[in-house]
């Protein structure tokens, strides 16, 4: 899939895919994505989660705009994420090894695992690697796996194919 970079750790690949997609086909796009990427979550749950998934998507992209060097200018996205944590009832639980992990109240909620992944990435200091492509016609989300975390454009090949797909969708 074009959304995945070569060096993205397995742990972050679902989040990488979620942020790469723009879901501009609406709830149908989201439901298809969720049933492919989060197969343990019921499709009807995905349908119901569309609005919250898009709130999460917009808040994370807004934070990502700060990962390329320009600071995010408001507290807005953080407030949205805090609200989603409460609304989706995400809490810390100790696992059998005594390690605290974030868990959702509902195992069929498709938004909660994505939100938890984003929070885990922030906690693990991997979030700053989730960037938006600096090419104005692209702005795709990508994971910067480079040692120096200095990439500003998504892979050349991905950049081009995304633009092509956008043009194809826009149609004549
Ligand atoms: Zn790009």
Image: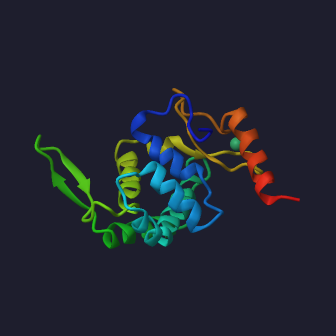
Residue 15 picture location, percent across and down: 47, 48
- Counting every numbered tag in the picture gives 0
The residue drawn where x is 39% and y is 60% is: 110
Screen quadrant of the N terminus: top right
The one nearer the camera, 151 or 23, is 23
As drawn, which residue projects farthest toward the top? 147
Q: Quadrant of residue 142?
A: top right
- In the picture as drawn, the residue positioned furthest to the right comes out as 172
Q: Where is residue 115 shown, x and y percent of the image?
A: 39, 58
Instruction: Give me the residue at 78% from left, 45% from top.
Output: 164
Left-right relation of 58 to 38: right
Instruction: Using the image, determine if residue 138 lies above or below residue 106.
Output: above
Colour treatment of the image: rainbow
Q: Is residue 42 shown above or below 147? A: below
Residue nearest the observer in this picture, 160 or 26 = 26
Q: Is residue 20 visible?
A: yes
Image side of residue 166 versus residue 140, left or right: right
Question: Which residue occupies the foreground of this view, 16 or 107?
Answer: 107
- Horizontal and vertical percent for residue 56? 48, 63
Give the quadrant of the C terminus: bottom right
Which percent across, then down, holds residue 91?
23, 61
Residue at 59%, 33% (x, y): give it.
150
Q: Nearer the viewer, residue 48 or 137?
A: 48
Query: Is residue 68 something that shows in the picture?
Result: no
Indicate the quadrant of ligand 1 in the picture.
top right
Quadrant in the rendering for residue 144 = top right
């Amino acid at each position: 899939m074009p959304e995945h970079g070569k060096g993205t750790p397995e742990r972050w690949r679902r989040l990488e895919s979620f942020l790469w997609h723009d879901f501009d086909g609406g709830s149908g796009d989201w439901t298809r994505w969720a049933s492919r990427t989060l197969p343990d979550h019921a499709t009807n749950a995905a349908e119901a989660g569309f609005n919250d998934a898009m709130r999460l998507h917009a808040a994370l992209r807004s934070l990502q705009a700060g990962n390329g060097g320009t600071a995010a200018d408001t507290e807005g996205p953080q407030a949205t994420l805090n609200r989603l944590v409460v609304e989706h009832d995400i809490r810390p639980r100790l696992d059998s090894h005594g390690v605290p992990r974030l868990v959702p109240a509902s195992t069929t909620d498709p938004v909660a695992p994505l939100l938890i992944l984003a929070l885990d990435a922030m906690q693990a200091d991997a979030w700053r690697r989730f960037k938006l492509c600096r090419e104005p016609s692209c702005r795709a989300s990508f994971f910067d796996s480079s040692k120096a975390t200095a990439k500003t454009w998504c892979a050349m090949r991905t950049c081009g194919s995304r633009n092509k797909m956008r043009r194809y969708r826009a149609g004549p």
